[in-house]
Amino acid sequence: MTITIAPHSDQPLTVSRLGYGTMRLTGPDIWGEPADRPQALEILKTAVAGGVNFIDTADYYGEDVTNRLIAEALHPYPADLVICTKVGATRRPDKSWVPFNTPANLRTSIENNLRTLKQEQIQLVHLRLMGHGPVPLAEQLGAMFEMQREGKIRHVGLSNVSREELETGLELGPIATVENMYGYAQRNTLSGPYGETRGGEEVLDLCEQHGIPLIPFFSLVHGLPNASNKLVEVAQKHGATEAQINIAWLLHKSPWILPIPGTSSLVHLRENLKAAAIQLSAEDLADLG
């Protein structure tokens, strides 16, 4: 299974429809070095060896931890590997997440990602929206499109975006991808201490209409321990874990969904990769809802 990013552009990117998100490779609270650095490097190598050619990262994971791990494990990169990063946020010493989204901030982040990932151009960058702050969306996206014209970015996406914000973004320029929270147990927007975490359900149909891949984050985080009995039943039927069925459900939900389940465990990575082979029947999907 493959999916094409920016299919109507002159530089489309076709990748396997199961990627890997690196956020969990850091230390506790997405901060600092991993507890087991050799395993973190092996996870990245194993993912690519297993057919993954889409890796999601951000320079504020760690800080810079996942970018440096990716470069150490995989550089020089395979020709078909797409590394996607995010900008628009940063971390404070107290580990809080705050906006970093003025045009100057965004340029600083892009330059930092280029340096730590050892790249001359980043193939895909998500602008991570951090609530309604003083910097208008048009100003943020304008800076991203400017760096795209300069050749620093190939494609621009949006992350943590509402339906209205996505509609606005599409009016401002080409949006290649959307990265929102989405999984079987949590599909809609959640409110938290740092604002709203936008769900995938409210933008999926719009993504499908425009040929925009939806990349779910936190797909395995919310709700699996308390998931419905149906998820447990379907998992038992297929001899799979609930996490595997969650990934399979995303893959079956829409051809425009590109899951990026993350893990810091080599065992769980191998389990996640096997989820791509699970074939859910029409009855399974009806049971799951």
Image (cartoon, rainbow, N blue to C red):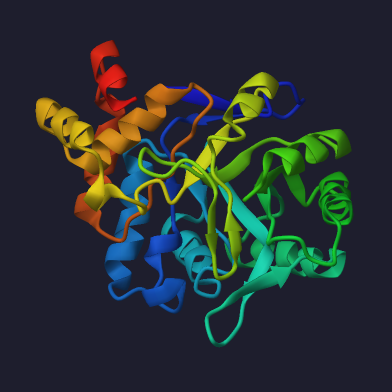
Residues 41 and 95: in front is 95
Describe residue 80's horizontal placement relative to residue 26 as left or right: right
Q: In the picture shown, does residue 25 fall above or below 152?
A: below
Residue at the extreme bottom of the image, as rendered? 93
- The answer to whether residue 78 of the structure is visible from this angle is no
The quadrant in which residue 273 appears is: top left
Residue 46 placement (x, y as % from top left): 30, 48
In percent of the image, x 86 and y 55: which residue is there?
143
The quadrant in which residue 50 appears is: top left
Q: In the picture shown, does residue 235 fall above or below 40?
A: above
Residues 22 and 41: in front is 22
Describe residue 3's horizontal placement relative to residue 241 as left or right: right
Residue 289 placement (x, y as % from top left): 34, 25
Residue 19 placement (x, y as % from top left): 44, 41
Quarter of the rendering occupied by the N terminus: top left
In percent of the image, x 77 and y 25: which residue is there?
10
